[in-house]
Image (tube, grey):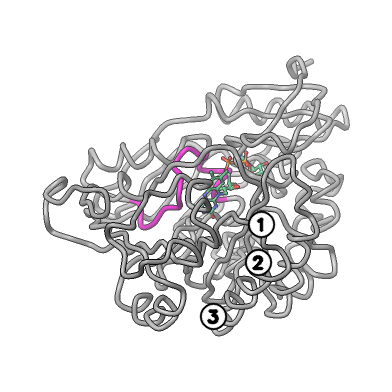
């Protein structure tokens, strides 16, 4: 009988999700993943994988077998001609960036942090900002997933595009991912600029900044102390406004031929792509984020700002606002829909549910789709209404995993 490992307690990065698993295993390689998954199947034990625990939702939770990505890490191959990378699924995004830099390549886009496991980030549709840039999962060209029997499903964009679109954002319910092949591009440096605008100035420039910069996004800060909650720098010296409340901390990033560090200061810097994207956060917030269709972006933003200024003035975490292009992934929050993402947060230990619920009620009006790893109020019906391929996704999931081995209570509600 295969050993499944001693169980134990698990908690996520911010500490709002925790559970006790009956077994915990750190598979050495894909063959070992197959062995433990098949054994769990024989014993009727559920299986979930952890990434780096940066999701705020109960997407990792299991009372059965929890698989760690710790040893499923490393670069398998870099193809410089086709600009692709084969990488084990537990590799941290930052490590992928460092390996690509050595080979004169770059990831196409990244989010605000680079400590997530690749599989964790891609499974939930993690994104950066850029009106013409898809989420990170839209860069997948192939992936391998261990099925309940222990067999491996090898999916490639070249040979089975429909299957790839089905599994590219799966929240871990289509099997244990062991590796990805990702599209990458020639190495590039980014020139980042930060400044502060008041809200109306930002609105007036919104469309132009989005259209003319590779990356544009901002944090709207209702109070002077808001920016400290997200470790944002003090941009007053680069500010177009004297105000320090109800302001936008603006950021653009663009390609540059200038060498790294040829510009370097508190509000402007140039560096290799993957060294510019990540910013600093501390685990002091519980975040909700929805992808809002681009056409409704400014209206939705104004409505949430109004809610915060009038009904919930005590809620002072910034709104983070970014752009992501639509993609064909069946369960991608950006499925066939160019979007902005709008996020708000509550503080640990504070009863923020009425506030988050009000934000949800506003964003629902625009058919916005939640980030799978951030707090939301989605039920089974909502998933059907928002995702045209939801029933196809469920049918495929039931075919691949008839016993629901890779589901937990949270995921059963949406995908069971
Ligand atoms: C400080 C902070 C900053 C963030 N910044 C951004 C951002 O800029 N953009 C954005 O979109 N999101 C962002 N997020 C959200 C984050 O990217 C997602 O929640 C992401 O899923 C976390 O990755 P992880 O490795 O921690 O995965 P986890 O949260 O541990 O897991 C996520 C999901 O992946 C599944 N999974 C993990 N490994 C496997 C595997 N091998 N096979 C199958 N399933 C697997 C898990 O079971 C789970 O369902 C941020 C979160 C935090 C806390």
Q: Is residue 7 above or below residue 204?
A: above
What SS does tag 3 mark? Answer: helix
**Which residue lies at the image location 73% right of the left edge and 58% below the top edge?**
376
For the residues bearing labels 1 and 2, Cβ distance under 8 angstroms:
yes
Marks 1 and 3: in contact by CB < 8 Å? no
Q: Is mark 1 within 8 Å of ligand 1?
A: no
Q: Which-is-in-front pick, marks 3 and 1?
A: 1
Q: Is residue 337 left or right of residue 269?
A: right
For marks 2 and 3, give the CA distance: 15 Å
Say which quarter of the image contains residue 86. Answer: top left
For marks 3 and 1, the one nearer the N-term is 3
Residue 168 placement, left or right of 73: right
Tell me where residue 405 appears, x and y as whole percent.
81, 41
Q: Is residue 117 magenta?
A: yes
- For disc 2, the marked residue is 308
Q: Nearer the viewer, residue 267 or 363?
A: 267
- Dot 3 crowding, Cα within 10 Å, few <14, some 14–19, many 20+: some
* Dot 2 beta carbon under 8 Å from ligand 1: no
Q: Main secondary structure of the magenta part?
A: loop
Residue position marked by numbered label 3 in the rendering:
298
Q: CA distance from mark 1 to mark 2?
A: 7 Å
């Amino acid at each position: 009988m295969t050993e499944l490992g001693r169980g134990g307690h698990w908690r996520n990065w911010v500490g709002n999700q925790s559970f006790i698993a009956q077994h915990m295993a750190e598979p050495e390689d894909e063959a070992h993943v197959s062995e433990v998954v098949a054994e769990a199947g024989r014993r009727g034990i559920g299986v979930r994988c952890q990434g780096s625990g940066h999701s705020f939702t109960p997407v990792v939770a299991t009372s059965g077998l929890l698989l760690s990505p710790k040893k499923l890490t490393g670069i398998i191959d870099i193809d410089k001609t086709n600009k692709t990378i084969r990488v084990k699924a537990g590799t941290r995004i930052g490590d992928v960036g460092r390996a690509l830099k050595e080979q004169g390549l770059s990831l196409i886009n990244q989010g605000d942090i680079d400590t997530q496991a690749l599989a964790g980030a891609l499974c939930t549709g993690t994104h950066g900002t850029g009106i013409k840039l898809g989420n990170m999962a839209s860069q997948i060209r192939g992936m391998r997933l261990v099925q309940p029997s222990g067999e491996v499903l090898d999916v490639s964009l070249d040979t089975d595009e429909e299957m790839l679109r089905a599994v590219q954002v799966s929240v871990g319910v289509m099997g244990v991912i062991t590796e990805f092949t990702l599209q990458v591009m020639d190495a590039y440096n980014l020139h980042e600029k930060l400044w502060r605008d008041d809200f109306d100035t930002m609105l007036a420039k919104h469309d132009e900044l989005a259209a003319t910069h590779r990356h544009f996004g901002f944090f709207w800060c209702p109070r002077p102390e808001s920016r400290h909650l997200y470790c944002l720098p003090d941009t007053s010296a680069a500010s177009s406004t004297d105000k320090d409340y109800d302001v936008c901390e603006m950021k653009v990033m663009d390609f540059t031929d200038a060498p790294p560090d040829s510009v370097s200061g508190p509000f402007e810097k140039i560096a290799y792509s993957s060294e510019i994207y990540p910013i600093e956060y501390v685990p002091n917030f519980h975040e909700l984020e929805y992808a809002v269709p681009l056409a409704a972006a400014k209206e939705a933003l104004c409505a949430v700002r109004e809610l915060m200024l009038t009904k919930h003035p005590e809620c002072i975490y910034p709104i983070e606002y970014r752009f992501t292009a639509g993609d064909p992934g069946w369960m991608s929050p950006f499925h066939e829909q160019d979007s902005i993402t709008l996020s708000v947060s509550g503080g640990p230990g504070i009863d923020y549910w009425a506030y988050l619920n009000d934000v949800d009620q506003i964003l629902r009006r625009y058919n916005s789709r939640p980030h799978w790893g951030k707090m939301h109020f989605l039920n089974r019906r909502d998933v059907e209404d928002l995702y045209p391929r939801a029933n196809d996704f469920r049918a495929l999931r039931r075919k691949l995993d008839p016993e629901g081995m890779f589901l937990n209570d949270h995921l059963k509600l949406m995908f069971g």
